[in-house]
Image (tube, rainbow, N blue to C red):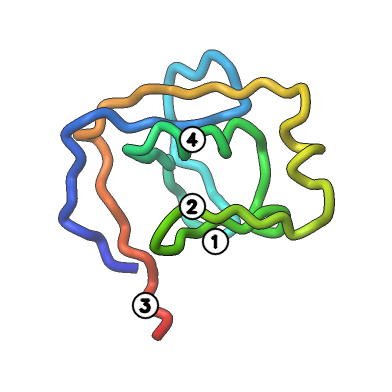
Amino acid sequence: MKVNTTVYTNLMYHGSPNPGITTFTPRVSTHGKHYVYATPDMSATILYGAKWNDFLIWTGADDFAEVIVERQKGVMESLYKNKKGYIYILDGSTFYQLDPPDNT
C-alpha cells in the first residue's frame, strides 16, 4: 500500500460506538494492520457508529454516491436500530492518506 503525500490540515471525523474516547490508539482491522481511521466527510462517520466488519457490510463509491451493501439480510437493522453512535472531531494535520491497493 502506497502512502499518498496528502496531509489534511482541516478537521477530520471519527465515528465510534464508544462514548468518551480521549486518546485514539491505532487498532488492528480485518486487514491485519494498525490504523486510526478518520475522514474529512462527517456524514461518512455515521456508518462507524456501530461495530461491524467487512464480512457484514461492504462500502464503496461510484461516480454519484457512497454505496453500502448488506452482506447478510437484516444486518443494518441489527447494527443500528435503537443504538447510539458518537462522532469525534480530530485535528486533520495528524492524519495522512493511504492509497488503496492497485488491483488492476
Q: In screen coordinates, is 39 left or right of 71?
A: left
Indicate which disc, 4 or 3, sits on the residue closer to the N terminus.
Answer: 4
Residue in the picture at 37% in, 40% down: 39
Q: In screen coordinates, is 2 left or right of 87?
A: left
Q: Quadrant of residue 83?
A: top right
Judge whether 47 appears above or below 96 on screen. Answer: above
Which amino acid is tagged 2? Glu
| Numbered disc 2: secondary structure | strand
Judge whether 16 appears above or below 40 on screen. Answer: above
Disc number for residue 66: 2
Disc number for residue 102: 3
Judge whether 20 appears above or below 96 on screen. Answer: above
Q: CA distance from mark 2 to mark 1?
A: 21 Å
Mark nearest the camera among 1 and 3 is 3
Disc number for residue 45: 4
| Numbered disc 4: secondary structure | helix
Quadrant of the snapshot with the C terminus = bottom left
Residue tagged by mark 1?
A: 31
